Image (tube, rainbow, N blue to C red):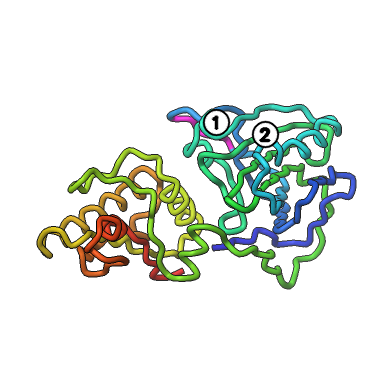
Amino acid sequence: MWRVGLAVCLAWPAHAVEFSLPGAALSVQIESPGDSVRLPRGRWQDGMEVTATEGAIRRTIYTVENPALTTLQLVTPLREQLLEAGYTEVFSCADAACGGFDFRFQLDLLPAPDMYVDLGNFRYVLLENPDSTSRLVGLLASASSTTGYVHVTEVADTDAFELTSPAQTVPEPVRLPPEGLVANLIETGHVVLTDLDFATGSADLGPGPFASLNTLAAWLREETEARIVLVGHTDSVGSLEANAALSRRRATSVLERLVNELGARPEQVQADGAGALSPVSSNLTAEGRSANRRVEVVLLSL
């Protein structure tokens, strides 16, 4: 859930870099007069710890309703504006070359659904200018099937601002509706994980990576109040008892992947199995039986 860090009135100086991203909308902006943020300066490696940078922090999310844009196209206009303003590029990388899943979660980003990160399709750029108000700027671009997202993190010295009296109220930031798997889960209360792969008759989940699990795990890490149940389903071939046991084991395999490898908290996820008792299609055809063999996510609370 949202944790708003703004405790006093803070106006980012007018002479800071004003970003322009063609076709983009500014969807969220959060400022804090004193905080810390992690902005990696290199590729993630096992055992690596990213030191947090302290200062006044501004986080901004831009969205572009253009699914054809690549992450390079999304990030290039802002990168060029910063270079023209005298910034030096410290580090840049894209998805797997950054360190993939582990690298992304070294970044302190605003949470889903405002910021969407495809763990197989993102690009990161870090730039620095000690003489500018925003002395350090991190850019992170990613895209869903319909929308491009750019997350801008600026770090400034706290003495660059004149702090006034405490604000009486802190408005909630504008929130855009979530998209894709998470949006369907919130809207309907359940969603099928269609990209999972199990060996025939086995509860062993394939090696992946599975985009649905990466997305679900990222959302669970951000939305700490969310609770889900993973429900396994089978076709009608075999006994009810055997199918119930197999469906439960498959759901448990998915739970273990989410918790042990993708960082979801154990208290957020349960697993159970319905066997062949909740078909979505006829078990009289091969196509129907295939559709009935599935693992479904059911949203309990948010």
Looking at numbered disc 1 in the image, what kind of residue is underneath it? Cys
In the image, residue 87 sits, relative to residue 115, either above or below, namely: above
Q: Are marks 2 and 1 in contact (CB under 8 Å)?
A: no
Question: Can residue 279 be seen at all in this image of the molecule?
Answer: yes
Secondary structure category for the residue under label 1? helix
Secondary structure category for the residue under label 2? strand
Q: Mark 2 to mark 1: distance in Å? A: 10 Å
Q: Nearer the viewer, residue 164 or 198?
A: 198
How many residues crowd around disc 1 within 10 Å: few (fewer than 14), some, or many (20 or more)? Answer: many
Quadrant holding the N terminus = bottom right
- The residue carrying mark 2 is 125
Residue 70 in the image: x percent, y percent? 65, 39
- The residue carrying mark 1 is 98
In the image, residue 136 sits, relative to residue 190, either above or below, namely: above
Q: Residue at x 59, y 61 (%)?
A: 3
Looking at numbered disc 2 in the image, what kind of residue is underneath it? Val
Horizontally, residue 34 falls left or right of residue 243, namely right
Q: Nearer the viewer, residue 85 or 5?
A: 85
Q: Give the image quarter of residue 77.
A: top right
Residue 249 in the image: x percent, y percent? 20, 54
Q: Give the image quarter of residue 107.
A: top right
Asked if residue 299 is among those painted magenta in the image, a careful observer would answer no
Magenta span of residues: 47-51
Question: Can residue 63 be seen at all in this image of the molecule?
Answer: no
Q: Nearer the viewer, residue 25 or 112?
A: 25
Q: Nearer the viewer, residue 258 or 211?
A: 211
